Image: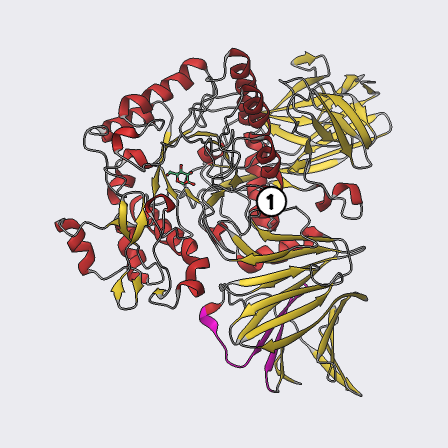
Amino acid sequence: MRILNDNKLMLEGDENTLITFLGENVVNFKIYRRLEPKYRVIDTESLRKVKVYISKRDDRIFAGDGRINITYNLKKRAFKLSCNNIDFCAHNVILSNKKYFIHIMWKNEYVYGLGERAVKFNRRGLRLRLLNMDPSVYRANDDPLYLNIPFLLMIGENFSYGFFLNTIRESIFDLCHNNDDKIVVESHGLEVNYYIIFGRSPIDVIREYTKLVGRAPLPPLWALGYHQSRAPFPPIFSIKMIIGGYRNEENVLKIAEEFRKRKIPCDVIYLDIDYMDGFKPFTWHPKRFKNYRSMLKKLNRMGFKVVTIIDPYIKYEPQSPMFRKYLEKNFFVKRDDKIFIGYGWPGKTVFPDFTREEVREWWAQLHKDLLESGVSGIWNDMNEPTFNVRLFGKKDLSRVRFYAGSLDEFRNIYANLMAIATWNAFKLFKKNKRPYILSRSGYAGIQKYAAVWTGDNISNWSHLRLSISMILSLGLCGLPFVGADIGGWAKIVAKKPYFARCTPELFARWIQLGIFYPLCRSHSMIFSQEPWVFGRDVENIAKKYIRLRYRLIPYIYSLFWEHTQNGMPIMRPLFLYYPEDDRSHRDDEFLLGPFMLIAPVLEKGSRSRVVYLPRQVWYDYWSMKKYEGGVISVKAPLDTIPIFIRSGAIIPTQPILNYIGERMVDVTLEIYPGNGSFTLYEDDGITIDSKYSLTKIINYMRGDKWNAMIERRRGEYNPRRKLYVYFRGIEEAEKILVNNKNIRPIELRRDGFIIDIGDNTKDIKINLSSIKLLDK
Ligand code: GLC
């Protein structure tokens, strides 16, 4: 073993081993016969460099930077890693038949990760393949699906660690399936490249992992509102058969008007494939969307943003001069040396080869008219890629290839490359505005360009539940902006059961849960699923919860900012905060940010819910009843989703709006008894280089005193709003001092009171004395 430079070690042999220590508990291993950089997701050398020390005793080599230490056993050719005297990772690597096998000892219970999967949340015991695919409607346990990420989060008894396989190629993860105490990772090619990330807690691991693969930028603020979408019937036969989608201008405007008339907040309307002429990307239907420009203007004036779907192909039309022009470019995926013709919604189609930069540039240019005429976001679908819309038949995919390499080698990264092309389109045609891209497929790093949704789920109760672990897993893998189709997408399923239909009850339960998805979109095939189609009662429930979503926007937006700082997801499993508590390893409850615990009702007919609360004080959001943790049972009538607030919580809220940006609004900080802190993030919500403002809030109680400190806002952005503080869970306070001046509440509520603190251009200290808390 020799040191190459400060932080790199080289171990030469049949296979070379290059070990790089990358500050803050991260080590990269490259073991190779031949280096294969083009198959890597990342090449990160930019983390803080550390200095490595090395020594040898008998047949062991010791190397480390003082924190992380590696022992290499020359005889067994095995590595042991330890950090702060915790041995956390023993593994060895074997090359066999052009494949590398990493054997990792893992006796502990919990293994999470690998992206979007419809299998059990804790992956222990499973063998999973990572290859992006279109399952064309999936059911529980179908695997793999559209989006794979070769990242594992392992949680041991007093430590956590992450494992990231740095390859874009197909891989297989055996997670204690064949061998109870071993994880075996199978990676193709002549280089195996992986990162090991140590953390005291899973939160540390996520921070370092997202530093490596990159974090999501802030979305445009409007994208945090409610999104409405509807799909047509799959276009198998003739266009006349299409029912269901928003299929003409009147139809779209009518939906928009309904939202405003019924005062149900909504920001985004989607146009699925039937806005196009024969489903051809970058066209508008000449009759049904003849005046699309004026339709878009009207919608924009009403406060709606429009997102259009774009599939990754061009219709094969040898007669059309336009198509021939495209063909001349020779920009498409090939089979042998000829252009490959597959099937998309328009029938025969050819597929852009996004592995080439000039293709990405050309594709970006194609968005000019859409983005300049008032479309605000682009929805990338079928990007696994689906070369075979099954309804049309099946094309042989052997020998299909990209410029960069074979289909199997590059398909996992196709969606990321398409998203980059789309991102470039925004750069060209929307100048400094933040892109909004929604992608179905993706791989590690997709979060830098796009939000994702969990594809074609089914309108049934098992998918309601599945949506939670799927979104949580994506969050752990670095994707904060994720949603599932609220209400369920598929109504007709190719496999048994053949029919599914969102019932009023299921929709009520789904919308209650869905407003806590980072991406809050209702989408469905054929049958409409707008909040009002299930009758008055369910409409009122939907309205109540969509409005709650809008009240929480300042909180949720600040969580997106937090992600940019530390990689934390928006929707969080309980175990992120209580990793040692076995009962926090669950998929039927989750946290929105640090403070709100959501326990949705997931069973048909159920009107109550058994909830597990980790040991500490929680408040029932609706009644302010106090709990000390443990298993409880609460009532949950159809209009109620159980929500619990962690003691000491600080939740910034705003008044209800029809859409984001409708008018300037003030912010109310809802503060709960206990100790806590939070940072409120504000900016213009739309431009990439917006100035921003940060307000740190600290909440603490001592005996019968309750104090809050709202620090002077930092940053150059002036939010032009007032701040209010709503102390919840308090019956009375003898004195309320704001910066040592006695004040009175501006409003008394059943469970607390609201005070006006004006602006926070100066530090604000609030002291409540001789308080009496609500006793419930
Ligand atoms: C795919 C998408 C779905 C969309 C449909 C028609 O199945 O996953 O969301 O509605 O195609 O474009």
Residue 7, relative to residue 113: is it above or below? Answer: below
**Residue found farthest to the right:** 703
Q: For the point 41% across and 57% down, which residue is it?
A: 414
Q: Was residue 433 drawn as part of the magenta stretch in this picture?
A: no
Q: Which residues are magenta?
A: 14-38
Q: For the point 55% across and 43% down, which residue is it?
A: 561
Q: Nearer the viewer, residue 511 or 723?
A: 511
Q: Label 1: which residue?
A: 569
Q: Secondary structure at mark 1?
A: loop
Query: How was this image coloured?
Result: secondary structure
Residue 202: x %, y % from top left = 70, 52
Q: Was residue 26 drawn as part of the magenta stretch in this picture?
A: yes
Quadrant for residue 635, please give it: top right
Q: Nearer the viewer, residue 677 or 595?
A: 595
Residue 733: x %, y % from top left = 79, 18
Residue 397, relative to residue 774: is it above or below? Answer: below
Residue 333: x %, y % from top left = 31, 60
Q: Nearer the viewer, residue 384 or 200?
A: 384
Q: For the point 62% across and 42% down, which residue is it?
A: 469
Quadrant for ligand 1 reads: top left
Q: For ligand 1, tell me if the residue under mark 1 lies within 8 Å.
A: no
